[in-house]
Image (spheres, grey):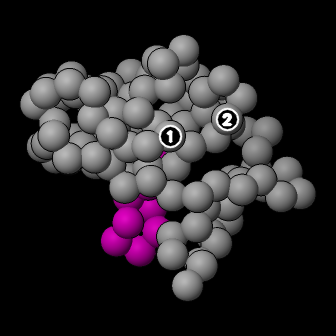
Amino acid sequence: MEEWIKVCDAKSLKNGDLYDFDHGDKKILLAKAGGQVFATDRICTHAYADLSTGIMNEEEKTVTCPLHLSAFKLDTGAPQNLPAEEPLKIYKVKIQDNTIYINLG
């Protein structure tokens, strides 16, 4: 089942931005790189660290964990290096009427 959640105004998210968003017990990371908006789980799969305080590489479309420096692809959630081995969950994103929505379904 699709559950689209309104997150923010599309104009408020600039290239290079990491935006944290909570919905119920889900902690979501929105990231904008190369004009694309991505949504993943916000907590690193290796150890409990908030990726919204990490470092984004816009060119490679990755976010690096601030705790142990594992990088994750924003489009697939795949870890790029150890110590993380599990991918992040990713979510569908749509922009409609200048508003960013994510699908939690």
Q: Amino acid at mark 1?
A: Asp
Q: Badge 1 is on which residue?
A: 75
Residue in the image at 28% along x and 27% along y: 80
Q: Amino acid at mark 2?
A: Gln
Judged by depth in the image, the label closer to the viewer, 2 or 1, is 1
Disc 1 secondary structure class: loop
Residue 36 is labelled as 2
Rendered location of residue 93, percent (x, y): 64, 55
Q: Image quadrant of residue 63? A: top left
Task: Report the magenta stretch's main SS.
Answer: strand
Mark count: 2
Q: Is residue 20 visible?
A: no
Disc 2 secondary structure class: strand
In the foreground, 11 or 95 = 95
Q: Image quadrant of residue 7? A: bottom right
Residue in the image at 43% along x and 27% along y: 62
Q: Which residues are magenta?
A: 21-29
Rendered location of residue 82, percent (x, y): 13, 27
Image quarter (top left, top right, bottom left or bottom right) of the N terminus: bottom right
Residue in the image at 58% along x and 23% along y: 16
Query: Which residue reaches farthest bottom?
Result: 1
